[in-house]
Image (cartoon, rainbow, N blue to C red):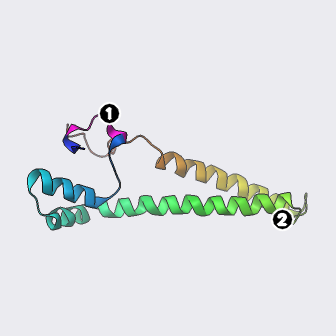
């Protein structure tokens, strides 16, 4: 798909989250060497933030695993109800659920958007 024809209606049809796609597009459309684009993306922090996005997804999955472990411990009676450990586990579950939901919302946010610290260029 031609990235120059992106719109709010078709944005979900485009592959994303890979700098190599940007490098390829610029090489194909504007004959810009992939190494040039790659260095610019590195200098401007784009690689970093795509890596951070992947780290956030991994963290969200780690929290999911921890929630499963805590749910099972409470459900199987490994943690005695009413004990300090039970109250701590319930508090931990609530905190992790809230944090995981916030990260999940970020990961599933709209693709048709711009950062709030820069103006749209089209």
Q: Is residue 43 magenta?
A: no
Q: Is residue 100 left or right of residue 118?
A: right
The picture places residue 55, in percent across and down from the top left corner, at 47, 63
Under circle 1, the secondary element is loop
- Mark drawn on residue 63: none
In this rendering, is residue 11 above or below 56?
A: above
In this rendering, is residue 117 above or below 20?
A: above
Which residue is at a point 55% across and 62% down the rendered structure image?
Answer: 59
Q: Nearer the viewer, mark 2 or mark 1?
A: 1
Q: Do we see residue 112 in this rendering?
A: no
Segment tinted magenta in the rendering? 5-12
Is the stretch drawn in magenta largely helix, strand or loop? loop
Which residue is at a point 28% across and 60% down the rendered structure image?
Answer: 19
Determine crowd level at label 2: few under 14, some 14-19, many 20+ residues with C-alpha closer than 10 A: few
The picture places residue 27, in percent across and down from the top left corner, at 14, 57
Q: Do we see residue 10 in this rendering?
A: yes
């Amino acid at each position: 798909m031609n990235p120059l024809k992106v719109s709010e209606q078709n944005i979900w049809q485009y592959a994303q989250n890979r700098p190599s796609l940007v490098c390829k597009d610029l090489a194909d459309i504007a004959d810009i060497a992939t190494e040039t684009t790659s260095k610019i993306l590195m200098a401007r922090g784009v690689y970093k933030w795509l890596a951070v996005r992947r780290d956030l997804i991994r963290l969200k999955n780690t929290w999911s695993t921890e929630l499963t472990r805590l749910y099972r411990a409470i459900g199987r009676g490994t943690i005695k109800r009413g004990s300090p450990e039970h109250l701590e586990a319930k508090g931990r579950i609530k905190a992790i659920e809230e944090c995981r939901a916030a990260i999940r919302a970020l990961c599933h946010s709209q693709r048709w958007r711009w950062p709030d610290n820069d103006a749209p260029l089209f």
